[in-house]
Amino acid sequence: MKIGIIGSGNIGGNLGKHWAKAGHEVLFSSRHPEELNDLVRDAGGDAKAVSVAEAWEANADAYLLATPFWAVDKTAELYAGEYKNKVIIDATNPYPDRDGEMAQEVRDGNLNSSEYVATRFNTARTAKAFNTIHAEHLKERAFRESDKLAIPFAAQDETSKQTTEQLIRDIGFDPVYVGDLAATKDMEVDHKVYGKSVTADEMRDLLGVR
Ligand SMILES: NC(=O)c1ccc[n+]([C@@H]2O[C@H](COP(=O)([O-])OP(=O)(O)OC[C@H]3O[C@@H](n4cnc5c(N)ncnc54)[C@H](OP(=O)(O)O)[C@@H]3O)[C@@H](O)[C@H]2O)c1
């Protein structure tokens, strides 16, 4: 798959490296793509660093959204129309200390943060994944043959579900489907499975899903 990484830090950078290692074509982007050369070199394969606009224009099969939460509104505003029907995997979390008032409003509001992101990217197919795992575990515990860590995920439709599930599996984690975006409460900051590095069976027990 061709994968556009929007925000190439702890989460986007490490996921992009894993996907490149798994044979995917990875486009790393940020506001400063000229600073991503080391990442591109480490990723190897077909990885490239591009601007955020170029990443959208590249018509990737899936996009990972891994910016600070405050950037969600701006990103959606700038690239509206470019992402129609695209799969967007949202790994963001709202933290008011970092992201300001809009993050507090989302935390206090009626929508899960994944639903908020989906409303902003309203013509895309949005999934939620990789927001609950510590960056260090994401980096160090991929590609395990046994004792794989579970990645809980949710998706808006069948295409985003299948794409996200495959991309979790390809890098040696175990996908655990939670449901649609309305079911992501347990994945939110400080909720039931946030920060939990456990196996798929343990994750299903925590979430009460089978
Ligand atoms: N760290 C964790 O353990 C962890 C775990 C799960 C989920 N998350 C969530 O994942 C997201 C990313 O976290 P992180 O730890 O990877 O952050 P990070 O290391 O600070 O990386 C953020 C990346 O986003 C880029 N960026 C910032 N504003 C942008 C914009 N407007 N457009 C495009 N790119 C932009 C930054 O580069 P430039 O500044 O050069 O643009 C940087 O590449 C956050 O929402 C976080 O809450 C983090």
Image: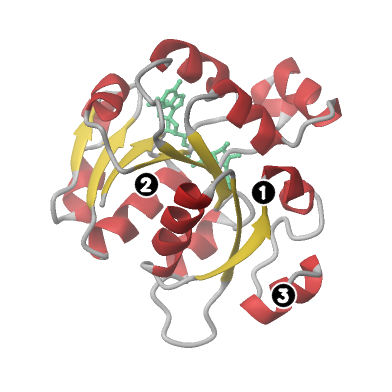
Vertical comparison of 205 with 120: above or below: below
Q: What residue is rendered at 48% in x and 71% in y?
A: 173
- Kindly identify the amino acid type of the residue bearing the numbered disc 2: Gly
Which amino acid is tagged 1? Asp
Compared with 129, 54 (above or below) is above
Left or right: residue 9 versus residue 184 is left
SS for callout 2: helix
State whether residue 189 appears in this view.
Answer: no
Residue indicated by mark 1? 180
Q: Which quadrant of the structure image shows residue 83?
A: top left
Secondary structure under badge 1? loop
Amino acid identity at mark 3: Arg
* Mark 3 nearby-residue class (10 Å; few <14, some 14–19, many ≥20): few
Q: Identify the residue under disc 3.
A: 210
Q: Nearer the viewer, residue 200 or 43?
A: 200
183 sits left or right of 172 in the view:
right
